[in-house]
Amino acid sequence: MRTLAFISFTERACMLACELAAKMRERGMDAQVAGPARYAERLGVDAYDSLDAWTAKHFASCDALVFVSAAGIAVRAIAPHVSDKFSDPAVVQIDEAGVFVVPLLSGHVGGANDLARMLADCCGAQVAVSTATDVNGLFAVDEWAHTQGLVICERVLAKDVSAALLEGTSVGFVSDFEIEGDLPRGLIASTAEGCSLGICVSYDETAAPFKRTLHLVPRDVVLGAGCRRGVESAYFARQVLDVLAQARLSVRAVCMLASIDVKQDEIALHDFARTHECELAFFSAEELRAVQGEFSHSSFVEKTVGVGNVCERAAVLASDNGVLICSKQPLDGVTVALARRPHTLCFP
């Protein structure tokens, strides 16, 4: 969680919002506060003209909204914007006396439950968490996936996993990656016989260890790419997706596309990043040459852009010196390499 927007409607509420926002900034978050114009300047907060306009703007742009107000005000304000728990921001309500903190929306995936606990800790308030898995002390797969940087592939099955755990039914669990900590209550390691529903943590979302498999894909792979000038977007995407398919690696795992700065105006790279919602990073030839490790080398590429390999070096550099999991794949006009960022999975 990075960006928080507080809103208040009385002077007392605004003072509490300012106090909480300051403590959130101490924790590395970008927190802003808005209040009525009549005292906004005196208290050093942003003035808002319309609650509807403020909510629409920050619901679309912030990780979390915090209403220091009555719950009803918050509910009415966000109602027109609520869409999907996998994409809605966290919404938390706290009364102006700082007695109760209530996560109203996106408790697990958006992090509203954790934010509410954090805010309560800052002002000595009591948290009122109502999500069923929390109330019953059970594993919440959507919350865990969010905190671990995992993409949930089948949303309906995620709900079925929670329902099964609430009913006391065991859920299977397998992972292609080492996970620190003990399995939470209700999960059974491996494809235990009689476990028709299970969770699979893997880059391969076609794996089917259970009759009904919920796939969780680590979003920690960096795609390093090189390409000829003016390559078509559809062609570039097809080549990349073919490499991913051959590696049995879901495109959902790709969190970033990296290349050399002379390619930063290539439309194909931007189109791929936008389509698959991954970040873009471009590096100079000097930066790429400085990357430590053994990489394939092309004298032609070095003569053309100043470094003998773009895709492998860009993938490793953008992955924080991660592990190269797929070396350079030279295709017709496109080169692709894949690296995995250092990423430790754990159970609380």
Image (cartoon, rainbow, N blue to C red):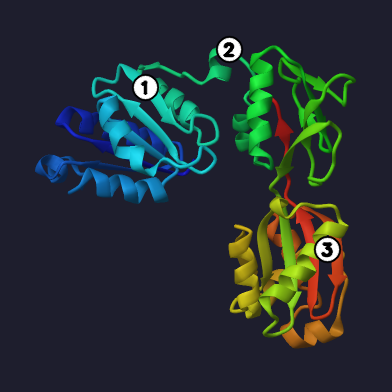
Q: Which residue is mark 1?
A: 101
**Going by the image, does 48 lie left or right of 302?**
left
Amino acid type shown at disc 2: Asn
Tally of numbered tags: 3
For residue 197, what is the image quadrant?
top right
For residue 122, what is the image quadrant?
top left
Q: Could you tell which of marks 1 and 2 lies nearer the N-terminus?
A: 1
In this rendering, the answer to whether 304 lies above or below 320 is: below
Which residue is pictured at 60% across the width and 70% down the height?
Answer: 270
Which residue is pictured at 65% across the width and 67% down the height?
Answer: 272
**Going by the image, does 128 lie left or right of 200?**
left
Mark 1 to mark 3: distance in Å? 48 Å
Mark 1 to mark 2: distance in Å? 19 Å
Q: Position of residue 5 (x, y in %)?
A: 34, 42
Mark 2, residues whose alpha carbon is within 10 Å: few (<14), some, or many (≥20)? Answer: few
Mark 3, residues whose alpha carbon is within 10 Å: few (<14), some, or many (≥20)? Answer: some
Q: Nearer the viewer, residue 152 or 65?
A: 152
**Which label is found at residue 136?**
2
Q: Which residue is mark 3?
A: 243
- Mark 1 or 2: in front is 2
**Going by the image, does 232 lie left or right of 207?**
left
